[in-house]
Amino acid sequence: MTFESILFEDARLADEVDSASEPEFFGDLNLDQMVDSIIRGRDEYNLKPFFYVALTDVDSIGYRHEIMRDLERSEVAAAIYAFSAQMRAMRAELAMAMKLHYRWQKQRYFLDGVQTYCTAIVAFARDLEGAAPRSHGLAAFLDYLKAYEQGREFVALKEGESRMRGALDLVRYSILIKGNSVTVRRYADEIDYSEDVQKTFEKFKQGKVKSHSTDMRESPDMNHVEANVLDFVARLHPEVFMPLDEYCRSHGDFIDRMVERFDREIQFYAAYLEHMARIKETGLSFCYPAVSGESKDICSVAGFDLALAEKLRRENGHIVCNDFYLKGDERIIVVTGPNQGGKTTFSRTFGQLHYLAAIGWPVPGREARLYLFDQIFTHFERQEDMKNLRGKLHDDLFRIHRILGRASTRSIIIMNEIFSSTSLKDALYLSQKVMRRVMDLDALCVYVTFIEELSSLSVQTVSMLSEVVPDAVITRTFKVVRRPADGRSYALSLAGQYRLKYEQLRERIGS
């Protein structure tokens, strides 16, 4: 297998990914928050575009699953983390070389960067081979890396760096300072009195004393005197510095393109594995989903909203997991129940699970079987926007029309509390029209609504209800369960909130 990318089997996608933009549904599903949490501390890799490109075939998802499982092995992870650390050190040295002003100092930092890079390549090829990766992607990269390490260009780069460093280590010179005059000349075997001076003052030591020395922190950039001294040294040793100058010019772009791509792309996996580890510490589970582009029989056991889980983790809170499934002709989950009962979170979870599966990651939950969609469309309630000169109902209709015009039978549609600005009669009529269109498409859908009649509209619809505590109906459990809507929980919770329950009314009337 020829290596092209650790993320994409098709190299064309790897080349085009940086032009991808954030999908429209990211904000509604809180995927933007999730991405920010996952990539925090990895700004140098520009990972966001990788999250914007969903995979389109099951084999590509399997390719990433294999790599993820490899990275869960400690020996593979250790090799990659060590390599990434060395590559970061190399970039820091090259960045310093760019910031400095004086020619020879810049070249020494460049040489340090080359040395770090060569050391990283050799060590990584050895360590990764020792870890024996099992995935097709990492095995192919290992083959590429070994061939690169033994190739003519890398060998010339490594041997040239060693030769330049060895020559620099042999450079000796003397500085004579007299008044304002500084003379630089070749070293002439002058006596080094430093050891004699130390021995002379050794006898004046009086045990451990308090140090009054000050740590002088200076910029790595040389001052003009140091730079002039180095220039003179270079003139005295052209046989060393001229080859160094030529070496730096001829190897200005020494980093191999595939190695550089791998170093960036592997962070996409590493960042998520670290994020998963943090979430798992709270007792939650992740699983590798079974993904199909054909069957719409889907399920999730103990799934949860990953963005919310991270928020609650930081707040020492607890998240509630939920299950769902669709089978046979079932396509639409209609979610009803009291406000603030977890309905919106459930709809986000449904969308997040499918999107995470489509980018080849393990998903929240103990078990999952998910559908490989072509597009996700979301319609979540928004505040009226005065800029578009549309009323709220008009805006709802405009957005829904746009979604239904673009959706296909392979799409996922998630709608949350639409048509809330109109009467119940009109909202029911419009919702039925929308759902009929979704049914005609045979698309998967989650429809969060306050209209319970929609849950029994067709054999394609499934009713799910956000529960409340039976003996305290204003207390939400945040569990969304598969059962017929009955309206009681919502009505009782509202009645209790406004002290309109039978017992409460009798008490008030009696008083």
Image (spheres, rainbow, N blue to C red):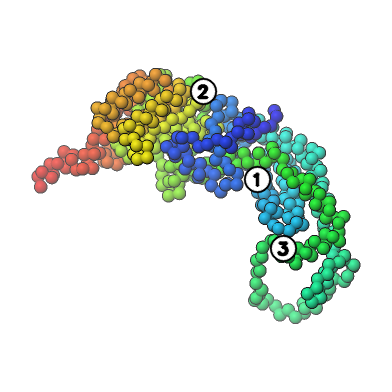
- Which is more toward the observer, 305 or 382? 382
Residue 487 in which image quadrant: top left
> Given this view, does label 3 or label 2 mark the residue nearer the observer?
3
- Amino acid marked by disc 1: Ser
Q: Secondary structure at mark 2?
A: loop
* Direction from residue 64 to residue 500 in the image, left or right: left
Q: State the CA–CA distance, disc 3 to disc 1.
A: 30 Å
Residue 202 located left or right of residue 298? right
Residue at (52%, 36%) from the top-left corner? 21
**Disc 3 element:** loop
Dividing the picture into quadrants, the one containing residue 196 is bottom right
Q: Which residue is mark 1?
A: 84
**Residue that mark 3 sits on:** 222
Residue 363 sits above or below residue 462 on the image: below
> What crowding class fits label 2: few (fewer than 14 Cα within 10 Å), some (14-19), or many (20 or more)?
some
Question: Which residue reaches farthest left?
Answer: 510
Residue marked by disc 2: 293
Front residue of this view, candidates 73 and 395: 395
